[in-house]
Image: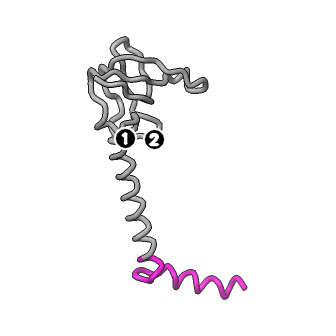
Amino acid sequence: MADAYTPQVSRRLERGSPTTRHLGEARAARTIERSMVEDGPMNGNNRSDIAAGMRVRVVRKEDQRSGALTEGVVRDLLTKSPHHPHGIKVRLEGGIVGRVKEISGA
């Protein structure tokens, strides 16, 4: 049974086959979904939503288990990527470093 299955798998994954075209479409759909998430509401996961001087609530590394939030004003953005699933890492004016969980405003 395994021998009969192996050629079918290799044939199915050849370049340009219907299955690989379908996989390409699925990847494109995931990219679109990801961009929709990135352009969604301001939740601290998108670097473009955060700027120096904004009031935010962050979770510090030592508070991750408890989920305790610390409020402050952003001094520096430390995450370089445009999106981070756990929140953009920032340094607050008091020197506290944490990941943004909520954006309070300017």
Q: How busy is the neighbourhood of tag 1: few (under 14 within 10 Å), some, or many (20 plus)?
A: few
Numbered disc 2: secondary structure: loop
Drawn side of residue 87 relative to residue 8, left or right:
left
Q: Considering only vertical position in the picture, is 57 above or below 14?
A: above
Image position, residue 40 (x, y; %): 36, 45
Image position, residue 30 (x, y; %): 42, 60
Q: Residue at 28%, 37% (x, y): give it.
A: 48
Amino acid type, callout 1: Pro
20 in magenta: yes
Q: Residue at 59%, 86% (x, y): give it.
A: 7
Drawn side of residue 52 relative to residue 59, left or right:
left
Quarter of image, res 65: top right
Amino acid type, callout 2: Pro
Q: Which mark is residue 52?
A: none
2 or 1: tag closer to the N-terminus: 1
Numbered disc 1: secondary structure: loop
Q: Quadrant of the C terminus?
A: top left
> Label 1, on which residue?
41
Q: How busy is the neighbourhood of tag 2: few (under 14 within 10 Å), some, or many (20 plus)?
A: few
Q: Camera-side residue: 105 or 13?
A: 105
Q: Residue at 32%, 25% (x, y): give it.
A: 105
Q: Quadrant of the N terminus?
A: bottom right
Q: Camera-side residue: 28 or 8?
A: 28
Span highlighted in magenta in the image:
1-21
Identify the main secondary structure in magenta: helix
Q: Considering only vertical position in the picture, is 77 above or below 80?
A: above
> Label 2, on which residue?
85
Q: Residue at 30%, 19% (x, y): give it.
A: 75
Image position, residue 37 (x, y; %): 39, 48
